[in-house]
Image: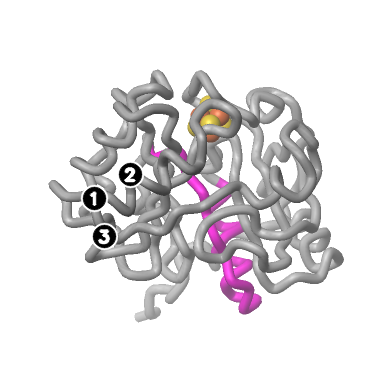
Amino acid sequence: MQNAPANPDATHSIQNLTLVVNEIYRSLQGESSWVGIPCVLVRLTGCNLRCVWCDSGHAFAEGRRWTVKDLLDRIEELGESLVLITGGEPLLQRNVRPLMQELLDQDKTVILETGGSLDIRIVPAGVVRILDIKCPDSGECKHNHLENLRFLGPRDEVKFVIASRGDYEWARDLIREHGLDGRCTVLMGVVFGVLEPRDLAEWILEDRMAVRFQLQLHKVVWGAGRRGV
Ligand code: SF4
C-alpha cells in the first residue's frame, strides 16, 4: 500500500499549470510588518471586489498567461528570498496554490495578500497570510468572509485601510470583538490622500489600540500612481 504524498500538489506536474499575471517585479515590501524588505512582487490578474479607493484597477483584467514553471524561473531570476503574491484577488486563480507550495519548497518566504472575501484555508501552511478586511467606506464591507478570522495564527496579519472616523470605529470594534490584536499582527493605514495619517495615529493612541500604524512605503518613496515599484 502506498503512503499518501506529503504534499498533495506533488502529484501534479507544474509544467501545464498556468496563471494570469498582471505584473512581476523586484521592489521593497510596501506594507505589513515586512515593510522595507526587498522582495519579488507577483500581482495576479482579476478581482471579485471593486473597492471605491482601489489603486490596483490595472489588475482587474490586464495581464498575460504564464506557466507556473516560467513564473518560478522568473522569480528565481529576480533573486529575492521574499515573495509577495497579491492582486487583484490572488485566491481567484486556483493554481496560485501550487505556486505557493513550490516557492515554500524552494525555501522562499511567501506572503499572500488577499482581499478577505474568500476562504483562506486553501493557502498552504507556512505562507504568511495578510487579510485585507474591507471597512464600510470601501463599499465592499458586505463581502468580508469573517469566518476567516477564526483561522488566523501568530504569523498572519490583518490589515484595515481607513478612510474616515467611521471606518476607524468599525475596525476598532471588530478588532476588540474578535480579540484580533492578541492573535496576530493588526495593521492600520489610511486611504492615501483621503484621511490624514496624523488623525489615524492620534485615534490609535487615544484608544490604546495594540495595532501597528503603517504608511504605504512605495507611495512615500516613489509617489502615488507610479506602477512597477
Ligand atoms: S480587493 Fe484590492 S484589488 Fe480588489 S478592488 Fe479592492 S483594493 Fe482593488
Residue 215 appears left or right of 221? left
Marks 3 and 1, the one that precedes in the sequence: 3
Dot 1 lies on which element?
A: loop
| In the image, residue 68 above or below residue 183 | above
- At label 1, the amino acid type is Asp
- At label 3, the amino acid type is Asp
Q: Which mark is residue 203?
A: 2
Q: Are marks 2 and 1 in contact (CB under 8 Å)?
A: yes
Residue nearest the observer in this picture, 115 or 99: 115
Q: Comparing marks 3 and 1, which lies closer to the viewer?
A: 1
Residue depicted at 73% across the width and 66% down the height: 38
Q: Which residue is mark 3?
A: 181
> Magenta part of the protein: which range?
95-116
Other-residue count near label 2 (Cα within 10 Å), few / some / many at <14 / 14–19 / ≥20: some
In percent of width and height, residue 35 lies at 60, 62
Q: Are marks 2 and 3 in contact (CB under 8 Å)?
A: no
- At label 2, the amino acid type is Trp
Residue depicted at 77% across the width and 62% down the height: 75
Q: Can you see residue 4?
A: yes
